[in-house]
Amino acid sequence: MGLHKTRLLIALLLSLAASAQARGPVRASEGNTRGWQLMTPEERIEHQAMIRSFRTYDDCRKYQVAHHQLMEERARQRGVELPRGRRDICEHLHPEKDSRQTAG
């Protein structure tokens, strides 16, 4: 990923984070956020606010994919390998989750 694309991705993520309100039950943390160790404390707060703000799975996933791309680029630049995520932080918003819960 080129420097221009990286800057655009950062700008996109920060603009989304600026408009998000911290609410909801989800807590982003080192244990469930890919690249947590590569984020500044301010970015961690913004990321957590974003994750809590989503009301649709698709919006959450778009943000998650962009965030993962940014963290992978940072890791590549620093010569480190990111651990694989353990769970999908957007899963609680998946539309099929509601139908699975009511079906059984």
Image: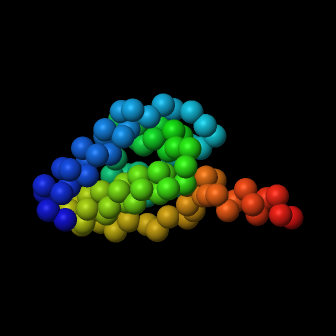
Q: Quadrant of the N terminus?
A: bottom left
**Residue 2 occupies quadrant:** bottom left
Say if residue 33 shows up in the picture: no
Instruction: State the residue lying farthest toward the right.
Output: 104
Task: Please give the name of the residue rendered at 31% of the width and 38% of the height, measured from the top-left corner.
Answer: 15
* Among the 4 quarters of the image, the one containing residue 75: bottom left
Q: Residue at x 25, y 52 (%)?
A: 9
Q: Position of residue 11 (x, y in %)?
A: 24, 44
Q: Residue at x 61, y 37 (%)?
A: 24
Q: How many marks?
A: 0
Percent coordinates x, y for residue 84 in the rendering:
46, 68
The quarter holding residue 90 reads bottom right
Q: Look at 35% across and 56% down and name the residue there.
A: 66
In this view, the residue in front, 14 or 87, is 14
Where's residue 6, x and y in %?
20, 55
Residue 20 is left or right of residue 38, and the answer is right
Indicate the position of residue 73 as horizontal and vertical percent values. Answer: 26, 62
* Quadrant housing the C terminus: bottom right
Residue 63 as seen in the image, left or right of residue 80: right
Q: Nearer the viewer, residue 41 or 50?
A: 50
The reply, left or right, for residue 57 in relation to residue 101 is: left
Which residue occupies the foreground of this view, 88 or 60?
A: 60
Residue 20 visible from this viewpoint: yes
Residue 64 sits above or below residue 40 on the image? below
